[in-house]
Every structure is written in C-alpha cells, then in structure tokens.
Image (tube, rainbow, N blue to C red):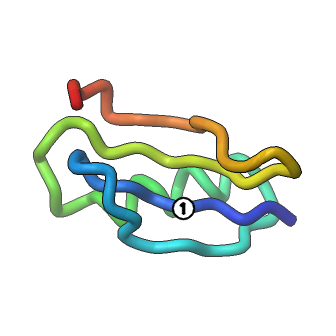
Amino acid sequence: MATCRVLDPSGNVVETKDITSAEDAHAWFVDVRADNSELGWRMEVQHTDGWSFFDDTEGAR
C-alpha cells in the first residue's frame, strides 16, 4: 500500500489517501479533480525519501 496525495495548481494538498495499486491511485486522482477544469493538478506518492511526482494534468505552475 502506498500513500498518495493530490495537489491543486497552487501546490496545496487537497487530499491524502492510502491506496493499494497504481490503477486505483490514478482513478482516485481523476475523481478528486473531476470537477476542476483547471490544468496543473498533480498526484504524488510517498516513499522513504519524501514525495515523488506520479501524474498530472499537464498544467504550468
């Protein structure tokens, strides 16, 4: 299980959740930002050295 978090285009953490697979994490990411047409949303996954980029909506910060 991995801890994932969704960040809005400003870099604020919107939600954090423990998820069992990458497929479930991506589906959750899409669901969390589903009502947001703004680009720049991203998902990160926690590991031993901190947080790493996982997916984004290809927006500019």
Residue 57 or residue 5, whichever sits in front: 5
Q: Residue 49 in the image: state x and y as whole percent.
A: 82, 45
Residue 8 sits above or below residue 16 on the image: above
Left or right placement of residue 30 versus residue 50 in this view: left
What residue did someone put label 1 on? 5
Give the amino acid type for the residue marked by disc 1 in the picture.
Answer: Arg
Question: Residue at left 62%, top 56%?
Answer: 25
Question: Residue at left 73%, top 54%?
Answer: 46
Left or right placement of residue 22 versus residue 5 in this view: right
Question: Residue at left 40%, top 53%?
Answer: 30
Left or right placement of residue 59 versus residue 42 in this view: left
**Residue furthest toward the front?**
49
Residue 25 sits above or below residue 3 on the image: above
Dot 1 crowding, Cα within 10 Å, few <14, some 14–19, many 20+:
many
**Residue furthest toward the left?**
37
Residue 39 sits above or below residue 32 on the image: above
Question: Residue at left 31%, top 25%?
Answer: 58
Residue 35 or residue 17, whichever sits in front: 17
Q: Residue 52 in the image: state x and y as whole percent.
A: 65, 39
Q: Quadrant of residue 56?
A: top left
Disc 1 secondary structure class: strand
Look at the image and tell me in which quarter the N terminus lies: bottom right
Q: Quadrant of residue 61?
A: top left
